[in-house]
Image: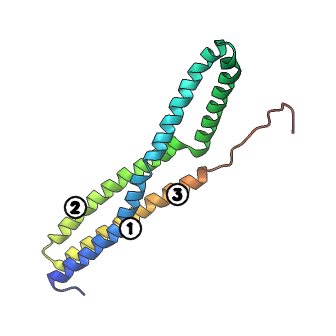
Amino acid sequence: MIEPQENVDTSIDELYEIKKNYIDKTWIWYRDHSSWPRIVFRLAGVTVIVLSLSIPFLAAAKGKWLEIGVPIAALTIAILSALNAFFAWQKTWEKRITIQLTLEGLMAAWETKMAAARRSEDSKEGYEMALQATQDLIENTRSLTVTETGTFFSSIKFPDVKSSKTGSR
């Protein structure tokens, strides 16, 4: 059992290390992996909008613009739309940023509980408060990431390509 105050501070410092090695790494991963789905979603969306709006102008053009421009624009629109449907860039961005912000809130709450634990008059009670706060933070983080991972894998499906021939079986 922990008796002297120094040992409690040392033990609480160990809880900070646990948080750093598990929670901080998880938060950093979500922070670092939230930007690219947003960027790809926005770029693909803008490209689809611009190309969709340009098709009538390309179709009205003569020569190579009509022969090459319209098919390339239509193919690009189809490819980007299919990739977005398959990779769900908007949902990925939304899930990751939501988890990142939730983790930030959980870490802030943990910090306040740790500050209260350090200020506790009873060192044993302070350590128990700090330990409980750390266990809660770990459990909440695990729950968030497991739920997100389960949602990700349950939504992955191979693209369903319907036959273009009517009446074929």
Which residue carries the number 3 mark? 149
The answer to which of marks 1 and 3 sits earlier in the sequence is: 1
The answer to which of marks 3 and 2 sits earlier in the sequence is: 2
Q: How many labels does the image show?
A: 3
Would you say 164 lies left or right of 2 here?
Answer: right
Q: How many C-alpha atoms fall within 10 Å of the one at disc 2: few (<14), some, or many (≥20)?
A: few
Work out which quarter of the rendered image holds the N terminus and state it. Answer: bottom left
The quarter of the picture where residue 132 lies is bottom left
Would you say 26 lies left or right of 63 here?
Answer: left
Q: Residue at the location (59% across, 55% down)?
A: 153
The quarter of the picture where residue 131 lies is bottom left
| Label placed on residue 45 | none
Which residue carries the number 2 mark? 112
Depth order, front residue of 67/126 = 67
Q: Closer to the camera: disc 1 or disc 2? A: 1
Task: Give the residue type that dot 3 points to.
Answer: Thr
Image x and y of residue 69, in percent? 65, 23
The answer to which of marks 1 and 2 sits earlier in the sequence is: 1
Q: Residue at the location (63% across, 17% down)?
A: 58
Image x and y of residue 106, in percent? 32, 58
Image x and y of residue 144, in percent? 44, 58
Which residue carries the number 1 mark? 22
Q: Residue at the location (65% across, 49% down)?
A: 157
Task: Give the residue type that dot 1 points to.
Answer: Tyr
Look at the numbered disc 1 and give the secondary structure of its residue.
helix
Look at the numbered disc 3 and give the secondary structure of its residue.
helix
Q: Distance between the residues labelled 1 and 3?
A: 17 Å
- Name, please, the residue furthest toward the right: 168
